[in-house]
Image: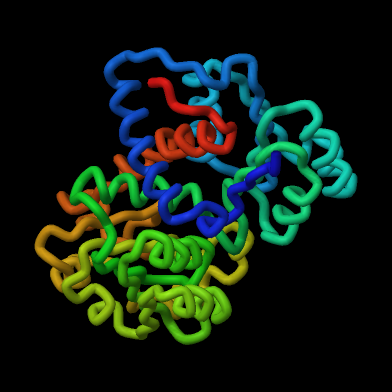
Amino acid sequence: MTVRHFLTLLDLSADELEALIRRAIELKRLLRAGHRYEPMKNKTLGMVFEKSSTRTRVSFETAMTHFGGHAIFLSPRDTQLGRGEPIEDSARVLSRMVDMIMVRTFEHEKLELFAAYSQVPVINALTDRFHPCQLLADVQTYVEHRGPIRGRTVAWIGDGNNMCHSYINAARQFGFTLRIACPEGFEPEARIVEAARAAGAEIQLLRDPLAAAEEADLVVTDVWASMGQEDEQRQRQAAFAPYQVDARVMAAAKEDALFMHCLPAHRGEEVAAEVIDGPQSVVWDEAENRLHAQKALIEHLAGVRPKA
């Protein structure tokens, strides 16, 4: 049987992704009802972290606990990867000992190489190019609050980064219009945009954040400087200053538009406090849904037929 990985949203079909969202919502309901469900009993998830994390580590570890399994945290300080062992060798060894592996790293190519040599499913828990697990949580959150996202309009305001790339893939898979407003020189990768458009997605690249937000159903942003870009902080603050999501931007969107941010957030930079802490913000539901969406993903990649 071929091992299936989740490196980008394109690794699953649109139908599979829709089913994952429905399953995540169901698993959340079952958990809150006190239902015990342990499809990963005696199974182990290896968690390889080269980038630090709060939500990713806690959500994956908790997911395995809920499922009756176990998670092992592996940082560069704890493994031979940190001492220069070839990625291929680490993948070969780890995948003979655990049942699934999630990797949070810098270069996306490193993740692809790891997956190529793994005998078990590999999950992208973030790379510099994509963050697909966050998109599962974001779409789940939108569906819970407003119903299907297909046919809606989403405004991405800020850097053309890994989250932006994943929103581009999500527009392609979930069928919503995506408007991206970013400063010159900080656009998403052209090949990712072109591939999505070729597949029928409606992707608009703009400079004006108000134009991007006009009548949007969802407004999303992220930090201006991601991990590894700290030395660019001052330059980025100057370039992105006109791209703060504030009350003006939200007023341009639909009256019932939602606001999302994958966190951690910098109030007063990419988002005003009045927005992230305001009534249109669903960032706390969004953060929690990392847990439920990833449980649905783990179940799917493990080949478990839901009994709950």
Q: How is the image coloured?
A: rainbow
Quadrant of the image containing the N terminus: top right
Residue 90 drawn above or below residue 176: above
Q: In the picture, residue 302 is in which quadrant?
A: top right
Q: Position of residue 79 (x, y in %)?
A: 81, 35
**Foreground of the two, 113 or 48:** 113
Question: Is any atom of residue 214 visible in this view?
Answer: yes
Residue occupying the point 89% across, 45% down: 85
Residue 270 drawn above or below residue 136: below
Q: Position of residue 271 (x, y in %)?
A: 31, 61
Report the residue that reaches farthest toward the left. 255
Q: As drawn, is 121 to the left or to the right of 270? A: right
Q: As drawn, is 39 to the left or to the right of 156? A: right
**Foreground of the two, 18 or 295:** 18
Residue occupying the point 38% across, 42% down: 287
Q: As drawn, is 74 to the left or to the right of 245? A: right
Q: Position of residue 130 (x, y in %)?
A: 56, 59
Question: Is any atom of residue 269 visible in this view?
Answer: no
Quadrant of the image containing the C terminus: top left
Residue 143 drawn above or below residue 190: above
Residue occupying the point 52% across, 20% down: 39
Q: Position of residue 171 (x, y in %)?
A: 39, 66
Residue occupying the point 29% across, 66% down: 154
Q: In the picture, residue 230 is in which quadrant?
A: bottom right
Residue 184 drawn above or below residue 162: below
Q: Count how many numbered circles sit on residues in the image.
A: 0
Q: As drawn, is 2 to the left or to the right of 14? A: right
